[in-house]
Image (tube, coloured by chain):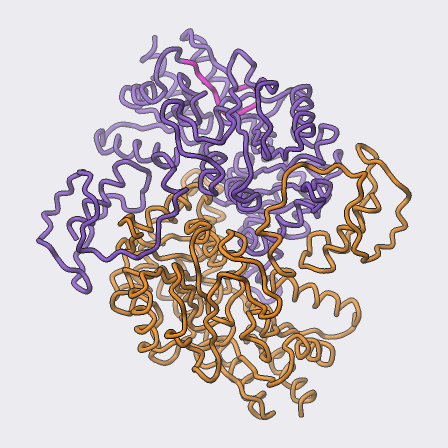
Chain colours: A orange, B purple
Amino acid sequence: MAAIQQSLSTSISSSTSTFLGQHKLRLRSQNVSLPGKTSGIVRCVATPSTETSYKTKVSRNENLAKLQAGYLFPEIARRRSAHMLKHPDAQIISLGIGDTTEPIPEFISSAMAQRAHDLSTLKGYSGYGAEQGEKQLRASIASTFYANVGIEEDEIFVSDGAKSDISRLQVLFGSNVTMAVQDPSYPAYVDSSVIMGQTGQFQKDVEKYGNIAYMRCTPENGFFPDLSSVPRTDIIFFCSPNNPTGAAASREQLTELVHFAKNNGSILVYDSAYAMYICDDSPKSIFEIPGAKEVAIEVSSFSKYAGFTGVRLGWTAIPKALLYSDGFPVAKDFNRIVCTSFNGASNIAQAGGLACLSPDGFKAMKDVVSFYKENTEIIMETFKSLGYKVYGGKNAPYVWVHFPGRSSWEVFSEILEKTHVVTTPGSGFGPGGEGFVRVSAFGHRDNVVEACRRFKELYK
Amino acid sequence: MAAIQQSLSTSISSSTSTFLGQHKLRLRSQNVSLPGKTSGIVRCVATPSTETSYKTKVSRNENLAKLQAGYLFPEIARRRSAHMLKHPDAQIISLGIGDTTEPIPEFISSAMAQRAHDLSTLKGYSGYGAEQGEKQLRASIASTFYANVGIEEDEIFVSDGAKSDISRLQVLFGSNVTMAVQDPSYPAYVDSSVIMGQTGQFQKDVEKYGNIAYMRCTPENGFFPDLSSVPRTDIIFFCSPNNPTGAAASREQLTELVHFAKNNGSILVYDSAYAMYICDDSPKSIFEIPGAKEVAIEVSSFSKYAGFTGVRLGWTAIPKALLYSDGFPVAKDFNRIVCTSFNGASNIAQAGGLACLSPDGFKAMKDVVSFYKENTEIIMETFKSLGYKVYGGKNAPYVWVHFPGRSSWEVFSEILEKTHVVTTPGSGFGPGGEGFVRVSAFGHRDNVVEACRRFKELYK
């Protein structure tokens, strides 16, 4: 038992996991042979599991074993918690994991409350909904975001969020595809690819997984990859406005990207979760680009518009015109995945989504977006005034700050230690993020202003 | 374009899919060469996709291609819709897909409405929650369902439902495991296994997928498999009370099952989504069996207790003592899957779950369960009075009616055609279900009584 405890603690120390946390394992009398009384002190020593504990004969999924450390954001949460333990009186401000902080507009939350109430009435009750989402919401998403590009309601799959859909898409594609990804990028693309067995082992020298094409996005190339140096892959993940760099690709760039996908016969998975933050004429949907419907899937979310990070609602658009090499429609297989592995987004969340897309709700979402964009400006001005080069921000709620020659985790730790502000280390998004720190604009105004005051103190 | 339309329609006709539905494809001018004007009449002819449409060079996931027809329940929904079109004036009663019909107890829906309202306040707002679920809910699930068996809060993973968790578990296990399943069983186990590539092709002669051990459950063996004839597999899916047979395994049987798993070094995935329907001394959790914590995972759900089929809330319990052959804790890898592929259940649904587990909420859930169990008795008595052998019912909301020598789909169609009642064909749950029809007790009382009147009319 003590050995299990040690082994588990060891694992925790090198990984994510709020799940075992500080929780002390209780001794259980049945079925456990006790080699000795546990002291309650947990030592982080790399002890293999004891011979005395029962093990199944099931091999661990080798793809899971390939994953490095923890998924980025729980890892940051872990470091934040450790910092709180160390500095119990510090006023910690989180501009880290990109979590929304502003209340959901009352118009939208009321619609959800109403739906919850209705569920207790005979007339308003509903059970299983369509796995693909409620018809009215699918229609509303299509007309709100895709009216001019011809995406129809039956091409919209409502989900519990973009992150879940990314993994469902990976299950759709299976183990035998190759993929390309922006470097840096939102870690769920790469990690879900590793889990599905699409990749090789992690190569520590280059900080990359084998068999993934990392498309480097830097200030030098305007955060748009040099496609002439990118090999053909089956799948290309592309996020614009980008998380973490904040860069929004232009119409010309996206046209180039669609042509690249088309020439290679690739499928483009386009993440537009921050599209409403665009304020110039960058496309808000990949389907604004002619020909995109034959190569692209778009994943999006209500999280960053309506504060639905906890409510959970998103969607994926898959055009009927998108076909596998044998002519089979991709959407039809995705529909099968959704029907088998998912039972629809919560009906209460869907009522919220519908309210978001009404005229009042849409205006309220725009106000939320505007609020966070003001935060972005404050953060950008702060770092600019300190002489740092900052990127992103304009079309996104993320500011990408360059600390040339320094390690991202080192800067992250320095900022946390000295200002009690949580940011995100750029290298957590891929080797291309090394030397950068992402500062999120999701925060109460007071906190953003205070964080910026502390930044100025630290880096003056 | 016409060819695409034909191809898509062909696909629909042989499959599930409300997603393309009756929707007529609009002609789009850009990027599509039109071989001729479409007539608007869609012929279901097996035409391969036309040479003129663009296809990507991405191969279709061969595992998806193995899947037979549609996922069962959307297929039934499709047949129901077709029946409604044919008989627009018929009063259709659904005792088919196991969808709850009774309103959510007001105490529980109020808690969700309150949480929705709170989300519009600065104090009550919350964004991303822990991927594993809110601490208080995890603790409450542990203390409500596992107080006496030592499952702790950090071994509970809250989810958006058991169906989603089954697929996440399959992603956890990966492609290289073997599995056994009760025959008949809830189709998500087998279909998710096929999708992950754990199986061979579908063998039409035996109606089984290769590389799955089907554990036959019949009236003759009391719906508990003869384990002496079951080969060792890595994973064993087991559902009790069973969907569709309604049989609850006894303590002796589950003890045998746990020993079988332990001797084989297998992992048991135990689905207890109907446990509250148990009224005899059958175990309500696999963890009541000594030693189960070293071999078992338990998946469960609020759906059938609180009417949460549309709200979406469930959980999976993975003991820390469950280890892979190399001693690595299964829960730790599942935690990584949950963190990478999921962002937690909706916070509003979780507020509902917490209310369910308060004394008032738990009593309300018991009342809901009692109501459906009265329905079960009405259905059982009806078929018994008609001379049919019926199984299940006692500890489950499903009645498993035997029509010896007849095809399940034929009986399903006969009942639908002649009584306008939707049931579920037993063979949809596996070849062992052939000759049976599952009648669900989820329905308004009036409808159940009326359906039984019609059954008596048909089979008198």
Residue under the image location 77 percent in, 46 percent down: A49
Q: Is residue A397 visible?
A: yes
Q: Is residue A350 visible?
A: no
Vertical placement of B61 versus A92: above or below? above
Residue under the image location 38 percent in, 24 percent down: B425
- How far across and how far down the image is residue B37, in percent? 8, 53
- How far across and how far down the image is residue A250, in percent? 35, 78
Assign the C terminus of chain A to one quadrant of the image.
bottom right
Numbered marks: total: 0
Vertical placement of B380 versus A188: above or below? above
- How far across and how far down the image is residue B13, in percent? 25, 37
Residue B459 on the magenta segment: no
- How far across and how far down the image is residue A220, in percent? 46, 84
* The image quarter in which residue A55 lies: top right
- Left or right of residue A347: residue B411: left
Assign the N terminus of chain A to one quadrant of the image.
top right
- Left or right of residue B124: residue A295: left
- Left or right of residue A226: residue B393: right
Residue under the image location 37 percent in, 62 percent down: A268
Q: Nearer the viewer, residue A174 or A248?
A: A174
Query: What segment carries the magenta color?
Result: B392-402
Q: Nearer the viewer, residue A225 or A5?
A: A225
